[in-house]
Image (spheres, rainbow, N blue to C red):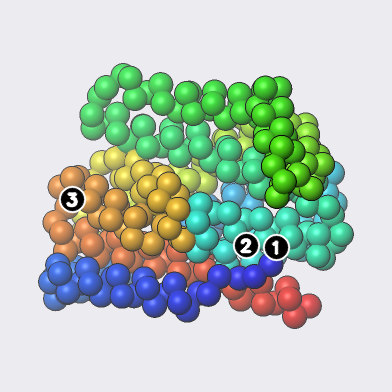
Amino acid sequence: MKQPNILAFAGIALLFYAVLLAYFNAGEIFHAAKNFNILYALPFFFLMSMSYLFKYSRWAFFIRGAGVSVPTKSLFMIFVSSLSMLITPGKVGDVLKSYLLKKKFGYEQRKTLPSVVLERITDLPSIAILSVAGAYSVYQNTFVLLLPFLVLFASLFTIKSDLCFRKIVGFVGNHARTKKYRKSVEGLYKNMRASASYRNLFTGTLLGLIAWSAEGLMLYVLLLGLGIQVNILFVISIYAISVIVGVLSLIPGGIGASEASMFGLLIVAGISKPEALAATIIFRAMTLWLSLAIGSLMLSSINRN
């Protein structure tokens, strides 16, 4: 499986950040970043570790439930290596985990891919809950509280519905270019439906909720380190919304889309433009680019061994 050209995307991101710095007065932004209290770095990286630990636990829970027996150390290394694919549209690069399980341990992808799909499905209500909770803490509209439940219902219907199953398999089988994949898609979908018990979905959503909450708290801690006080639920909501915007944009890594939404919402929260942009750039550097570097190093290690 080919890894994205990290240097090319890094160059695009640096150009994007340079334009922002030039437009919004780089001096003021660097001054805001320079005032970061280094004591907040420890809780920041602790929360980052907790986020990935719970995300790993969720994937391991799904993959073990599918009958995959792989040493914990190897499974964790494969999970970390998948961070090298963060710069892919809509996080589709997570299929690297399934690819490596086949390459290293011989498991068919139709057996392991459902775990990746279930990760994304349980992400939907998790992020929806966080985005709505923060928004409701500031703009109290009871209608928005229904959003997470609507998302969860739509996800369950898509997996459990025989109608959806027939439509998907039929669509693949009725087109000349995809007809040869009908059996593979049918097997994949059946395995996913078997794994998508209500217990598994609830557990996955809960673990995802904790993991995404930890990442939202990272943004809150970063703001505290910059000397900025904001409603904690609203900050977590800002992060959740920026994730949604980044995924829906289908831009690799959400570059530009996630930053723009986070920057704009921080300004709505009453933060000055220099401080908002400093927080956005630092946060993205730590959560996207640092994770990408760690994942790439782990993938290189796996390939060497």
Number of other residues with Cα within 10 Å of mark 1, as a class: few under 14, some 14 to 19, many 20 or more: many
Gap between marks 3 and 1 measured at Cα: 38 Å
Q: Which structural element holds mark 2?
A: helix
Instruction: Measure how far apart labels 3 and 2 are at the Cα level.
Output: 33 Å
Whether residue 244 is visible here, answered yes or no, is yes
Q: Residue at x 57, y 30 (%)?
A: 155
Q: Residue 12 location in percent, x, y?
A: 37, 73
Question: Are circles 1 and 2 on residues that touch, CB within 8 Å?
Answer: yes
Horizontal placement of 55 versus 290: left or right?
right
Lower sequence index among marks 3 and 1: 1
The answer to whether residue 192 is seen in the rendering is no
Where residue 189 sits in the image (x, y, percent)? Answer: 74, 37
Question: Nearest the camera: 179 or 240?
Answer: 179
Residue 187 is situated, as x and y percent measured from the top left of the image, at 81, 39
Picture residue at 79% right of the left edge, 48% below the top: 180
Residue at coordinates 25% horizontally, 75% vertically from top-left?
18
Please name the residue that numbered disc 2 is placed on.
82
Q: Can you identify the residue that label 1 sits on? A: 78
Q: CA distance from mark 1 to mark 2?
A: 6 Å
Numbered circles on residues, count:
3
Which residue position holds label 3? 267
Q: Nearer the viewer, residue 1 or 84?
A: 1
Q: Residues within 10 Å of mark 3 (few under 14, many from 20)?
A: some
Q: Amino acid at mark 2?
A: Ser
